[in-house]
Image (cartoon, helix red, strand yellow):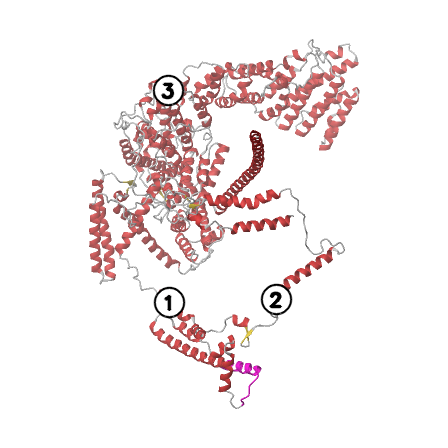
Amino acid sequence: MASSTDSNVKGENSQVSYKKYINTKTDRVLQSKKHANDIFDVIEYLQSEKDKEVIFATNACSKVFCQLFYRGDLYVGDLPEEEDLVNGDRSAEEKYRIFMRHRYSNCVELLLENIGHKAFQVKETSLCALMKFVAAEGKHPLQNLDEHYNFPRELLQTLVEHLLSEKEDMSLLISRFQEFLEMDDVRYYVMSSVRDNIYRVMGRNKKAVIPVYQNNVFTLLSTINVPSEASKMRHFLVRQDYKLEQWKVAKLKEHKRAFEQMWLVFLKFKLPSNMYKKILVILHESIMPQMSDPTLLIDFLSAAYDIGGAISLLSLNGLFILIHKHNLDYPDFYKKLYSLLDPSIFHVKYRARFFHLVNIFLSSTHLPAYLVAAFVKRFARLSLTAPPTSLLILLPFICNLIRRHPSCRVLIHRPSTAEEPCDDPYVMEEEDPAQCHALESSLWEIKTLQKHYHPDVAKAAMKINEPLTEQEDDISELLELSTFELMERELKAERKTIPLEFDTATELLKSSREVLGVHFSLE
Amino acid sequence: MMRKQQTFSRGLSDKVRKSKAAPEIQKNPFEVKINRKKFDVLGRKSKHDVGLPGVSRSRAIQKRKDTLLKEFRLKDKNNTFIDRRFGEYDSKLTPEEKILQRFTLERQRTQDRKDMYNLNEEEELTHYGQSLAEMEKMTDVIDSDSDSEEKGLLSAELTATHFGGGGGLLRKKSAGDDEEEEHKPRSRQELIEELIIKSKQEKRERQTQKEEAQELTEKLDQEWKSIQNLLAHKTPKAERTDETDKPKLDQYDMMVRELGFEMKAQPSEKLKSAEELAREERQRLQTLEADRLKRMMGDAEEDAVQTNTHISADDMNDGFILDGDDRKTLAYKDGKWNIEGEEEEKEDEDGDEEGGEEEEEEDDEDDAEGEEDDEEGEDDDEDDADEDHCDLQSDEGSEDEDGQGAEEEQVCAEEPPAVSEEQKKAAQEAAKAELPYTFPAPESYSDLKQLLQGHGSEQQRLILDRTLKCNHPSLSAGNKAKLQKLFGFLLEYVGDLATQNPPDLRTVSALIPQICGLCQMFPEAACKAVQTLLSDSGHSMEETLEVKGRAPMPDLDMLVLLKITALLFPSSDFRHPVTTPAFLFLSQALTRCAVVSLEDVCKGLVLCCLALEYVSLSQRIFPELLNFLLGLLHLTVSDKHNMGYTVVSPFRRQGKSCDLLVLKDPNVSHSWNRKPISLQTAHRLPAQSPVERDHYRLSLIDSCLDLVKRCTWLYKDLPSYAHIFQPIRALLLKHLPVEGYPAPIQDLHREILDAIPEKPSQHAPLVFKKKKPIPLKLFTPKIVQILDYGKKRGNTKEEKERERLKHKYKREFKGALREIRKDTRFLAREKLSDVMSRCVKRKVKELYGSLATQEGEWKALKRKNRK
């Protein structure tokens, strides 16, 4: 075909000029087949260095090609090589269509490249244009397929591939992409293409951790939600008229399966540690209920549970659901839980969730007394290092445990051997709750906490001095308590009198019990 | 009809009301019902102790018969309504006319009645030519005795004229006496005129007499006054002159009363000797200390609520308590509460030594006094001897360590003001030339800043002092508010001083007495000001924590504020509106603030010092403090593997800034010597050479270890002492690179390790507190003071009023119901009786009929038989 008209025209490209130029070109392309070559100029703009020009050109391209799709001016079927076109004996009409089809694929390639562009706006418009093409291709398929269900899978797959970049954080674009995921067919095909993509990428990287890529995958995966009922699946990008019931995409079961496979593939590979936390936080709420068989997660969960620290705490939630709802048998669950308890549990971010779960785990009255006693004693020992917010949870919790298990009452009341001092028989280092002799011990730690500086903590600790009341304390309100809330509570309380220090100070570092002045000087 | 009925019923009820039960019924013992009382209550009147149920019932029945029954009988028997108003049925009159006529009629009716005995209204009534209205004002003073005199006097003429008795006699007499020359019977008219003139004359005479007598009494009064002045020496001269000027009748009464109520001379309070003053001061401090301890135990709040303690009936109300708490009065030694008997001996010795020193001090003071006034010196010495004796006695008494403790404190408390006053004097002299003596109270923070800026720290203190004095609340009403605001400004100013570069902590320290003084004056305002600062700071820290997950260490101004808080408010209280939030702030800072530089370490150490100071008296456990100290010591360890302890937030086991306190050059320890760290380095560490930095590190480590040592002292009595310090012990024993440290630190290290036992101490297993046996019932009655008997207590006025109305309504409602029920019952009974009577009449008729026929038949039979 003839070469493009000279590009000097756009030389002095003021804002108006390039808009006008592109507009006229697109109009000409659409008006008559004679000016088909003008499409080159428009496509050229897609590679421009100016963001605004690219955006404008993208919009123009999507307009042109959508129109062409509508007219049926794109060649349908396997595309012959462009070089062959000159020799081949085809009609002018056919030639034109093949030519346009080639331009279309050029354009798609450029748009896909633009998804990796620097400017977000460019990315966004490219993404939107591509999704428009997806919709248009769905309506006017470019391949002659035998089946009646046509969806441009290849295009979507390449799009997903570009979305899940290995070098760049695409979370913003992915959140934009989320709106397309509302469509059931798009979601289904995205899920399957993500699965293939993970396989391919991770296999290529020999199963090493790729934080950026995995982060992108996670962002995409966490935005996918399978509808809860099959009746809600009525929203498609490409309408299918023929035998809707038999179409895979319209079946909830298929969706769930795709969802499950996608996650399992993702979790199969090694993950960075912060990714574990992210996944575990949303696991029980947004992943497990949407899977057809959640027990398949057991490998992932037990691996996470063995990692230790906060990750172990978080994996408790998922494990609990599996044990509770799916009859999973997890040997030594309590033993492992026991060994999880160390001073850091009071300082992690997920403290509230942890205590909530431990409260549930230990709520059964069928647990053996030695086990509960071991937990109680260990909690008591750890409470010596806990901040007041944790202590306000911990002390009622311990009291609740003793209430639930009356045989543990010996921990706070052992009248037979009273008055004879003895060593603490409890072995803190022992990892097996059966071996730690907790039942033979007493909660001297709580006794110590009766001297705690915070009045509420001291009062809570005082409760063990007398027989506990029947009623359990409700700790659910205390779980999210922060130090500042405690402080505000103190500040807002009404007091009648305000006692003052009676020996008046004369200097900053001089008082009856000076410690600061011993170590520090004003100069 | 309505009208008629109304009048009718009114008449009836009036009649009923008037009819009284015959008195003989009331005396009849069978009629009287006495409501038995369970017990008598003095001073309570009860209306219903005796009742006459029969009488009242019959009265009620009678009343019903008279009213209700009548009404019932008249029911459905029509009456006509007769409107007897004027012209009601006259159709010729228009309504206006009707109304007018009625009105005039009504006016006439009232007018007629009124005017019957009414004299001319317009005429003014006079007496002796004076208006009666005028006289009623009683402007003229008339002696009370003169009135009485007059009352008794009834002249013959007066009686004659007034009562008209003996008219003929009078005429005869007068004819004989006065008008002999004429011998002419005068007309009645003349006679009367003469009489009038005569009586007038007589009256005038009497009046003059009265006036004379009055004058005389007045004169007498004046004379009495002059004498009285001599008698009552107290009346000031000015008053006396006033009295002579305008004599008043009640002046005398006033005087009498004054004399009667005059205060007897009362002995004034004896001037207290120094000894007594000291004793009082000591007592005051003791009570304050006891109070503080109570608050520390956390039972002061309950006490405040239930102030009315049980007083025995045998209480003489002289403050004597048989087994009071005076046995174990409270005292501290080194911040420890000593009540155990074991340590007594040891401390006795200490106490003696201290006592000796004290005596010397006192002697010194006495010497100084002696020089000033020689005459009293001997007396003083005697006093001293007495005092010493007293002290000895109390020392010998096994329980009295406390007196000394308190005295020590007193000495401590007294010494600094003397010093500061000297300083002040010096400063005053220096600044005399420049500083004005009065200052307006600053209205805003910028005012205060202007006032104080540019002066030296001592001058600033002086300015503040003068400002406080000039604006003392007793001087003007608005001063209180001004000074309350000033406290907030001062805290802000102090904060500014602490954050400026370099921080001016000298001035802060100089301003402390003024801040303390203000706080003592306005505890509420001070409390509020400190609370707001704490809350603001806590809030901003919380916000940064939420956004970033970690917060920077609080700045120097917060540290200074926390320190000032400890100076102003007792940190030992179980719960305190200021110190408890301050505790929480410390806790927050010690757990959540990142330690990334040596400055942070220094700030953290300051926080630790403060935390320790806060709990040093109450010996409360502060887990965050120990965690933080462990974390600080962890920073000194270079090899972070194989630890036997866990560090918690804000420290990490490994990572960046985890070796802040590791010495770079092991040889610096030789050149290090112990000296206090400057607080200013917490703000910004000046650029130093590596050696100096290492010295700084060593100082920090030294302080840190010292704090650990203090903690071990503080907590050594806790049941879990060993467990609390187990991580620190593990660190000190195995990981601390103590070999590289100078000798003093090594000593400290050894001391701490000695203080922490390897094996936890033994403890008795826990048991519940034994329940106190329920005490036997006491014979002495528990007296509860009730001021308003029979009233419901504990409500506001409106609530009470509402309650009362509700109650009244309920009672009335019930009464009305009862009455209605009784009415219906009565009516039913009446109806029944009507029916019954009707039935009986018929039956009797029938019977009579049948009997008559029977009789007739029988008679007829008889007649037949006879025949």
Q: Is residue A63 left or right of residue B854?
A: right
Residue A412 falls in image quadrant: top left
Image mark 1: chain? B
Question: For this rendering, which residue is in front, A466 or B853?
Answer: B853
Residue located farthest toward the front when viewing the structure as drawn: B867
Considering the numbered disc 2 on the image, is that residue within a helix, a strand or a loop?
A: loop
Considering the numbered disc 3 on the image, is that residue within a helix, a strand or a loop?
A: helix
User: Any magenta on residue B194?
Assistant: yes
The range drawn in magenta is B182-201
Q: Position of residue A474 (x, y in %)?
A: 44, 29
Q: Position of residue B469 (x, y in %)?
A: 41, 57
Q: Amino acid at mark 2?
A: Met
Q: Position of residue B285 (x, y in %)?
A: 31, 48
- The circle on residue B116 is 2
Q: Is residue A134 left or right of residue B789?
A: right
Q: Amino acid at mark 3?
A: Leu
Q: Amino acid at mark 1?
A: Glu
Image mark 2: chain? B
Question: For this rendering, which residue is in front, A15 or B599?
Answer: B599
Considering the numbered disc 1 on the image, is that residue within a helix, a strand or a loop?
A: helix
User: Any magenta on residue A449?
Assistant: no
Residue at 52 percent across and 20 percent down: it is A210
Residue under label 1, please give it: B258
Question: For this rendering, which residue is in front, A166 or B83?
Answer: B83
Residue under label 3, please give it: A371
Question: For this rendering, which residue is in front, B154 or B39?
Answer: B154
Q: CA distance from mark 1 to mark 3?
A: 90 Å
Q: Main secondary structure of the magenta part?
A: helix
